[in-house]
Amino acid sequence: MSFAALTEEEDSVALLQRSLQRGRLGHAYLFHGADLAELETVARTLAKVLNCEQPKRRDQAAVDSCDSCPSCLKIEADNHPDILWLRPESKLRVLRIEQIRDLLQTVYLKPLNARFKVAIIVAADRLTSNAANAFLKTLEEPPADSILILLSSEPQRLLETILSRCLRLNFGGESVRHQDPALVSWLTRFSQTAAQEQKSLLARYQLLSVILAKLAEIKENTEKSLTKRSPLETHDDVDAKLKERWEDELAAAIEAEYRRQRTELLTCLQWWFRDIWFQTLRLGQEMLTYPTLAEAAGRVAGRLSAEQAMDNLQLLERTQQLLFSNVQEALALEVGMLQLSL
């Protein structure tokens, strides 16, 4: 796939192409968005452009791939020796320090038959702390003729020292994710409940039940979907150790996907509370993420000061951070709902 085919990512792709045109491509990027598969496509396409034998040019600079030369075909098939992919492995689905060390040994070698060596780290938010720290120096000063690309659907989990060393581009953008019909439908139900008077403890637990019911639905659907795709469903007679490994990998994949979707759900909730804050500031509806939910947001905003609305946003952010630790999910959400100003 070429950049021209990535029509839904037009704005972010345009930024990359302007950097290519001006000869100012960064040495380390963080591509983030809701869908890791889409991020992989963008990273793969950039690797093609950098090494294409017949690129499409603008002001003599390569800005897109031909998608048909030997280099492009090898990169598309993930078998180009100078395009390095690193993915989470082991039953914990993490990126281990041993993987990073192996990658760095290869990165510092000269490209075999490409102009640029490209290292693509999938789900970079799964780096262990040791792996992240081992990666920092190379991330700050990569070897010549190399580009490092980190992909993440949960960039808030990355160390600040990692984030500060990368140029960040958002793909599969926030507006697309926030307007997902299923999420908007759920958020409509939540906002209508929140817009009612919230003076009683029972009302707060009704809000909590709306969240927990949706999360239970997400977990059930995730388990069904990933279990259906697991080799456990198609291979009955396998070695006991292999079966155990597949079971561990399935459990880890379910947990990772559930956490990703939970983050999406709570991020949409945060953006609705951002709309409430905007309404306390008397900003126009053109600033709202969810204009169709403006009435419910306005009813809540009418009961709050701008400071209280901002405190709500900070509280939701802290709740998200807590959920990435070992805290019990239901407890973190219960405390968050009880502390919100509504």
Image: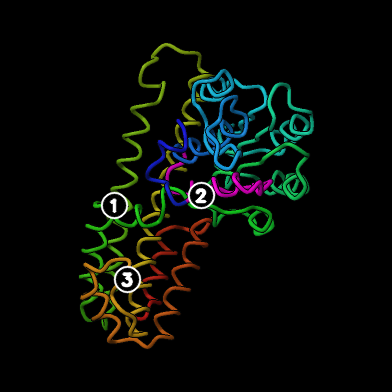
At label 3, the amino acid type is Leu
Residue in the image at 27% along x and 75% along y: 297
Q: Is residue 107 left or right of residue 55?
A: right
Q: Is residue 127 left or right of residue 291?
A: right
Label 1 – label 3 distance at C-alpha: 16 Å
Mark before the other along the chain sequence, 3 or 2: 2
In the picture of the structure, the residue carrying the numbered disc 2 is: 32
At label 1, the amino acid type is Asp
User: Which image quarter is the C terminus in?
Assistant: bottom left
Q: Callout 2: helix, strand or loop?
A: strand
At label 2, the amino acid type is His
Image x and y of residue 199, in percent:
27, 83
In the picture of the structure, the residue carrying the numbered disc 1 is: 180
Label 2 – label 1 distance at C-alpha: 18 Å
In the picture of the structure, the residue carrying the numbered disc 3 is: 288
Q: Which residues are magenta?
A: 12-36
User: Measured along the vertical axis of the image, is residue 128 above or below residue 102?
Assistant: below
Q: How dense is the environment of label 1, judged by Cα within 10 Å: few (below 14), some, or many (20 and up)?
A: few
Image x and y of residue 185, in percent:
22, 57
Mark before the other along the chain sequence, 2 or 1: 2
Q: Callout 1: helix, strand or loop?
A: loop
Image x and y of residue 45, in percent:
52, 34
Residue in the image at 41% along x and 52% along y: 173
Among all residues in the image, which is located at the extreme top?
Answer: 237
Q: Callout 3: helix, strand or loop?
A: loop
Mark before the other along the chain sequence, 1 or 3: 1
